[in-house]
Image (cartoon, grey):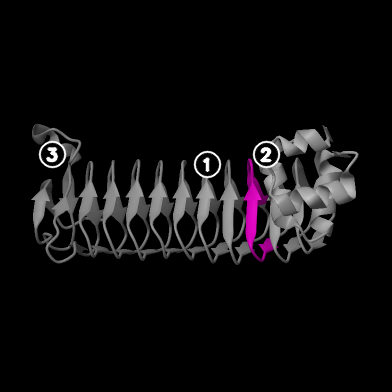
Amino acid sequence: MDLTKNFVKNKRPCADGFRWFLRNHADGSDYQPLLNALVDAGRVEDACWLLTQFGPTDEVLQVDAIDAEAMVFAGTLEVQGNIEVTTVLRAGRSIRAGGGIRAGKAIVAGEDIQAGGSIRCDGTLEAGGDIKVAWGIEVEDAIRSGGDVRAEWEVLCGAGLTLDGNLMVGQDLLSKGALRCGKSIRVNGAITAHDSVWAGNGIACGATILCDSHLEANWGIKAGHAIVAKGSIKAGESLQAQEEIQAGEGYGVYAGLVVQLEAWEASAQVHASSKPQRLMSGWWGGACLV
């Protein structure tokens, strides 16, 4: 793709960025070489803007490892080992690493992100598709995914966690912002959320669910230990915990919100070590037998 002066100007770039383009590439430039030149000149934000304007390519870059200040690539990155960037790692399509991925400010992919190790980022982690990690995920800011998020170890998120698909975590999940999952949440360890939790389908947790705001799932919610929220607890179907189910002061516990009243005994059961206070809907079934 040949980016001419008029072609770039029609996208309304910032004045400073366009002056840099005229000084350095007045006769035009191919797409990826221009992205590389911007990154080399320390104009990473301009490179990201250019990629947003002109979109991804089908080009694939295959390397053994990446250790750079920043990387902005319009196609797919395939790296055998680790990826280490000081600031921004961005790909128009997918990022695939045989080892871990580490970035100082942001990791962004238009499609999937896959890592054979851990992902660590001091900023945001964002993928248009799935995020799949063989170890853990630790992100200081938000995590956003247009597909599934799967980590075999823990997931630690310093802000909100938003995804369109399923969330699957092998160990503990900590979210300091709101957690919104378009499908189901399945966590083998504990869920600790310092804001609200919402799932379009169900929530299954191997240990305790602690939520500092409202906890809601359109299907059921199940925990291996306790379910404790500072706001309301709402389940479209059943609620089950081996220990207590406790909503916040002044809030209620609701089960069977999408189930007809005559079907509550079968599909809107509430099981816990003791009957929850302010159980507003659902069929109380006593303590769990297993």
Tell me which residue sits at (18%, 59%) in the image: 272
Cα gap from disc 3 to disc 2, whole angstroms: 52 Å
Q: Which residue is mark 3?
A: 264
* Residue at the (88%, 45%) spot, across then down: 25
Marked residue nearer the N-terminal end (3 or 2):
2
Q: Is residue 208 magenta?
A: no
Residue 210 position by quadrant: bottom left
Please identify the quadrant where the C terminus is shown. Answer: bottom left
Sequence-first disc among 2 and 1: 2
Q: With 221 as the anchor, is 252 left or right in this view?
A: left
**At label 3, which amino acid type do we have?**
Trp
Q: Answer few, some or many: residues within 10 Å of disc 1's Cα (few below 14, many 20 plus, some between 14 and 19).
A: some
Taking 260 as reference, is 214 above or below it? below
**Mark 3 element type:** helix
Image depth: mark 3 or mark 1 in front: 1
User: Does 23 sit left or right of 179 as displayed?
Assistant: right
Q: Residue furthest right?
A: 27
Check disc 2 and report the residue beneath it: 53
Helix, strand or loop at label 2? It is: helix
**Which residue is located at x 74 percent, y 63 percent?**
85
Give, as a single range, the part of the protein colored magenta: 101-114
* Image point (41%, 51%), residue name: 186
Q: Nearer the viewer, residue 245 or 108?
A: 108
Q: Amino acid at mark 1?
A: Gly
The foreground one among 274 and 120 is 120
Q: Quadrant location of the N terminus?
A: top right
Instruction: State which tag comes first along the sequence, 3 or 1.
Output: 1
Task: State the residue position of label 1.
Answer: 146
Percent across and percent down for residue 37 are 85, 52
